[in-house]
C-alpha cells in the first residue's frame, strides 16, 4: 500500500482557510460591527458579537473558482423575545442601519447579509452573514430571529438556538489535540469534495452538515511508536472510516407519498436539534449516497494501490486538482531498493 499521508497534508495546506488568512474579510467584519454600533436606531438594544461558522470552528476551505468568501457573525442582543414578539422588528434594526451605507443588503430567513465586491484584482467577492439573537430571556436560553422582511406571521419566529455551544462543541472535538487536527483535515477534505461533486446543485449537502456528521462518524487513525512516543496519522484510513460510517447510517424512511427512500439524518447537537439534511429530496439524497459510495470505492482502491502516483490520481478524481500528484522520479527515489524479510514460520 502506498503511503499518501504527505500528499494529504499538502492537499490540506492548499485548501484550508482560517480566519487569520483572510485580511480583507476580517477588516470588513470589523468595519460592519463598528458601523452597526454607531448607527443603530435609538430604540435598539446593545449587543455582543462572536464568530460562528467554519472560521470559528477551524474548518474553513478556500472557495472554488466562481465562489465567494463568507464569514458568519452572531449578534446577541440584550433583549427578551417576550418584549419583541415580532423578530423582524429586531432584524430591521440591523437591516435598516446597513442600508444607509451599503448597496447590497438582504434580509434572509436566518440572517442579514451584506455583500461586497473584492477591492483587489483577481480576487473573490465576499459577504458577511449576521444572525440576530435574543439573549436575555427568562428561561436563560438564546433564540434566533427567523424570517424575511415581508414574511407572513406564520413564517417568522424566535427559534431556540445555542450558537456558542455549537461552536464550542465542534472546536473542542475530539478531546485529544492531535486527533482534533486530523478531524479538521477530514472535514476540510469532505467540504472540498462536496464543492466539487455538487457544484451548482440545489439543496446539496452543506458544510455544517458534514462537520456535524463528523461528531458521530470520525475516528482518529494512527499508529503509535511507543519508543519515541510519536504518532503516525493516516488520513486515508480516517477518510475511509468516515465515509463508510456515513453510508452505514442511511436508513429507509417512509416519505410523504408512502414510498420508502434511504436517508441520512444529521441532527444538530444543540437546539433546535433539527435534521440538517431534511430539505433534501429523495432523489437528492440518493445522489448523495451514490457519490459517497463512489468516494469510498476510490479511497479503497487507493489503499490497495502500491504506486503513489496512481493512488493520488484516484484522489484527484474525487478532490480535484489541488490534490498533489508526485512525479515518477520522486516516487522511484523514495522507494529505493526493496528488502523483503519473511517472518513466517518454517
Image: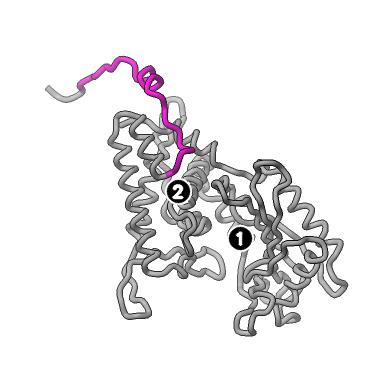
Report x, y in % for residue 226: 41, 29
Image marks 2 and 1: residues in contact by CB distance under 8 Å: no
Confirm whether residue 138 shows in the render: no
Q: Residue 137 shows which numbered tag?
A: none
Specify start and end residues of the magenta stretch as a single range.
319-342
The residue that disc 1 covers is: 165
219 is higher (above) or lower (below) than 169: above
Quadrant of the rendering where the N terminus is positioned: top left
Provide the secondary structure element on which disc 1 rests. helix
Disc number placed over residue 193 in the picture, else none: 2
On the image, the x and y values in percent for residue 283 come to: 37, 67
Tell me if mark 1 has few (under 14), some (14-19) or many (20+) residues whose alpha carbon lies within 10 angstroms of its own: few
The residue located at (47%, 45%) in the rendering is 189
Mark toward the viewer: 2 or 1: 2
Q: Residue at x 61, y 60 (%)?
A: 165
Residue 222 image-quadrant placement: top left
In primary-sequence order, the first of circles 2 and 1 is: 1
Q: Is residue 115 visible?
A: yes
- Residue shown at the point (55%, 54%) measured from the top left: 170
Q: Position of residue 52 (x, y in %)?
A: 64, 56
Amino acid at each position: 500500500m502506498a503511503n499518501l499521508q504527505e500528499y494529504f497534508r499538502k492537499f490540506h495546506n492548499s485548501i484550508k482557510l482560517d480566519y487569520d488568512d483572510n485580511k480583507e474579510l476580517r477588516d470588513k467584519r470589523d468595519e460592519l460591527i463598528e458601523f452597526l454600533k454607531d448607527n443603530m436606531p435609538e430604540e435598539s438594544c446593545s449587543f455582543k458579537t462572536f464568530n460562528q461558522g467554519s472560521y470559528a470552528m477551524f474548518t474553513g476551505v478556500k472557495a472554488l473558482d466562481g465562489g465567494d468568501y463568507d464569514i458568519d457573525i452572531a449578534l446577541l442582543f440584550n433583549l427578551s423575545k417576550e418584549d419583541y414578539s415580532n423578530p423582524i422588528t429586531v432584524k430591521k434594526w440591523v437591516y435598516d442601519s446597513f442600508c444607509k451605507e451599503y448597496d447590497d443588503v438582504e434580509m434572509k430567513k436566518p440572517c442579514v447579509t451584506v455583500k461586497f465586491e473584492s477591492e483587489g484584482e483577481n480576487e473573490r467577492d465576499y459577504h458577511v452573514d449576521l444572525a440576530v439573537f435574543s439573549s436575555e430571556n427568562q428561561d436563560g436560553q438564546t433564540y434566533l430571529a427567523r424570517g424575511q422582511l415581508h414574511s407572513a406571521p406564520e413564517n417568522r419566529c424566535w427559534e431556540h438556538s445555542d450558537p456558542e455551544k455549537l461552536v464550542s462543541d465542534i472546536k473542542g472535538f475530539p478531546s485529544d489535540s492531535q486527533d482534533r487536527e486530523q478531524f479538521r483535515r477530514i472535514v476540510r477534505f469532505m467540504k472540498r469534495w462536496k464543492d466539487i461533486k455538487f457544484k451548482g446543485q440545489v439543496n446539496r449537502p452543506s458544510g455544517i452538515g458534514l462537520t456535524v456528521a463528523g461528531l458521530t462518524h470520525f475516528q482518529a487513525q494512527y499508529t503509535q511508536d511507543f519508543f519515541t512516543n510519536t504518532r503516525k496519522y493516516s488520513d486515508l484510513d480516517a477518510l475511509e472510516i468516515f465515509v463508510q460510517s456515513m453510508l452505514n447510517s442511511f436508513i429507509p424512511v417512509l416519505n410523504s407519498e408512502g414510498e420508502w427512500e434511504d436517508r441520512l439524518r444529521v441532527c444538530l447537537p444543540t437546539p433546535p436539534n433539527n435534521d440538517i439534511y431534511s430539505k433534501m429530496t429523495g432523489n437528492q439524497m440518493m445522489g448523495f449516497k451514490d457519490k459517497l459510495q463512489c468516494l469510498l470505492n476510490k479511497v479503497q482502491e487507493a489503499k490497495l494501490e502500491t504506486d503513489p502516483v496512481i493512488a493520488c490520481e484516484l484522489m484527484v478524481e474525487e478532490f480535484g486538482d489541488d490534490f498533489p500528484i508526485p512525479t515518477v522520479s520522486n516516487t522511484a527515489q523514495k522507494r529505493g531498493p526493496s528488502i523483503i524479510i519473511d517472518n513466517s514460520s518454517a
